[in-house]
Image: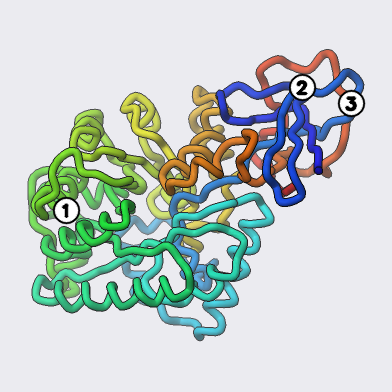
């Protein structure tokens, strides 16, 4: 048996922590019990939380770290992706993604919803202690290639299954796919019960869909790439309409994650809640700042009641794949959100989306969520005697540069 104690224990059975709390686990990490420490017991000077769930990552793009210019907007970012996507050897790509996964694991990421466009990451994932669900993302703006693209992704799904991975097709976005492919890949993905979709990532995306104008529209026209239909509605509404066009009936069954949603409105959230049986939102704040210096409308998201998850996106649009850095960013930008709620987004809600909340996401007896220590950067993780004057309800360990490391 192992015992860990800290000034604050976030079991996430509620948003409030246990002050001077402990957790005891089996050697394999299965939680035995939690509780309050005895007076005088030494505790870690920080917080204990469950293992994180990275709800949106492109780990196979880790070889692109440090190669992208910041602040280009989505049109400029897409140009860089097209320019730099194949600028490394296969060995270099695999080495970079393994390093990234190992780093996330050490920082306390227990599970990941990962986007893959090829099989580069399959072998590493199959041997890694981190659980991953792989979303096999497809592209294809030409409607005549829909059948060919779907045949290819089905073959990739079979290959992923050969590595023992949970994997299924998923659509990319409104602007990289023909209406036919968006519908076909969504219906195919939902056969697994899970779907992930990039939606309303920027104002440029909305301008393109609503009026057929703006930098992203011009970029596609200039490069001879088919443009998406001008619907006069949001890209989120377009996605929901394409689901129903595939013969699915509202509420559409399955766990559907819409990623980014930087332009989400209360009306859009209400429609998503009506059309989708189990909608989820994924925010990737540091990626949004990297590309277009913007943040998602957290107040709208919270008021919608749709569960919020946290992801890191990729090292093409982020300097690091660090869940605590994402939490720090949200905590600084939205101080009205309780810290326990942020941890719930980063842990429990991600586990719910992946269908793993019976094992992950909270520190409860019988679960095996991973045990993570959060501490103030610049201070070595240390023990301290329980102090009677501890500030009630606060967690002084979280600063703008708080760090995390795995305990179990």
Secondary element under disc 1, as helix, strand or loop, is helix
Residue 41: give its label.
Answer: 3
Q: Position of residue 138 (x, y in %)?
A: 27, 68
Q: How many marks?
A: 3
The residue carrying mark 1 is: 208
Residue at x 34%, y 24% (from the top left corner): 303
76 up-or-down from 256: above or below: below
Describe residue 113's horizontal placement relative to residue 109 as left or right: left
Residue 65 vertical position relative to residue 282 in the rendered view, above or below? below
Q: Is residue 257 left or right of residue 55?
A: left
Q: Secondary structure at mark 2?
A: strand
Instruction: Please give the name of the residue rendered at 72% of the width and 49% of the height, measured from the top-left corner.
Output: 408
Q: Which mark is residue 36?
A: 2
Contact, mark 1 vs mark 3 (Cβ under 8 Å) = no
Whole-Å distance between the Cαs marked 1 and 3?
60 Å
Sooner in the amino-acid sequence: mark 1 or mark 3: 3
Badge nearest the viewer, 1 or 3: 3
Horizontal and vertical percent for residue 109? Answer: 59, 51
Residue 10 pos. (x, y %): 64, 30
Classify mark 3: residues with Cα within 10 Å, few (<14), some (14-19) or many (20+).
some
Q: Pick whichever, 62 or 1, lies toward us.
A: 1
Along the line of sight, the residue nearer the viewer: 183 or 126: 126
Marks 1 and 2, the one that precedes in the sequence = 2
């Amino acid at each position: 048996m192992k015992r860990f104690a800290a000034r604050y224990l976030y079991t996430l059975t509620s948003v409030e922590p246990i002050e001077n709390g402990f957790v005891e686990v089996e050697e394999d990490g299965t939680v035995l019990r939690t509780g309050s420490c005895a007076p005088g017991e030494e505790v870690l000077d920080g917080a204990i939380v469950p293992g994180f769930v990275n709800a949106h990552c492109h780990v196979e793009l880790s070889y692109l770290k440090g190669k992208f210019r910041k602040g280009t907007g989505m049109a400029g970012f897409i140009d860089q992706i097209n320019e730099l996507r194949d600028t490394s050897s296969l060995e270099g790509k695999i080495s970079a993604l393994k390093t990234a996964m190992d780093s996330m694991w050490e920082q306390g990421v227990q599970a990941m919803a990962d986007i893959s466009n090829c099989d580069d990451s399959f072998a590493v994932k199959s041997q890694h202690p981190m659980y991953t669900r792989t979303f096999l993302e497809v592209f294809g703006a030409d409607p005549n290639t829909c059948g060919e693209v779907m045949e290819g992704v089905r073959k990739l799904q079979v290959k992923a299954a050969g590595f023992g991975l949970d994997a299924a097709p998923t659509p990319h976005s409104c602007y990289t796919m023909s209406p036919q492919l968006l519908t076909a890949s969504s219906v195919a993905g939902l056969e697994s019960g899970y779907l992930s979709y990039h939606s309303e990532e920027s104002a440029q995306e909305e301008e393109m869909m609503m009026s057929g104008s703006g930098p992203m529209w011009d970029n596609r026209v200039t490069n001879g790439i088919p443009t998406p239909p001008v619907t006069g509605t949001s890209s989120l509404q377009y996605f929901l309409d394409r689901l129903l066009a595939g013969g699915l009936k509202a509420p559409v069954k399955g766990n559907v994650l819409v990623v980014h949603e930087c332009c989400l409105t209360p009306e859009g959230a209400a429609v998503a809640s009506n059309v989708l049986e189990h909608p989820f939102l994924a925010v990737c704040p540091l990626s949004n700042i990297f590309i277009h210096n913007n943040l998602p409308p957290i107040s709208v998201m919270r008021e919608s009641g749709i569960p919020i998850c946290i992801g890191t996106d990729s090292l093409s649009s982020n300097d690091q794949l660090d869940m605590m850095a994402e939490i720090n960013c949200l905590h600084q930008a939205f101080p009205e959100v309780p810290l326990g709620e942020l941890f719930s987004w980063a842990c429990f809600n991600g586990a719910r989306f992946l269908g793993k909340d019976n094992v992950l996401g909270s520190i409860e007896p019988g679960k095996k969520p991973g045990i993570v220590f959060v501490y103030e950067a610049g201070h070595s993780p240390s023990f301290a005697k329980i102090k009677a004057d501890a500030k009630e309800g606060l967690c002084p360990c979280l600063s703008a540069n708080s760090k995390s490391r795995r305990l179990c």
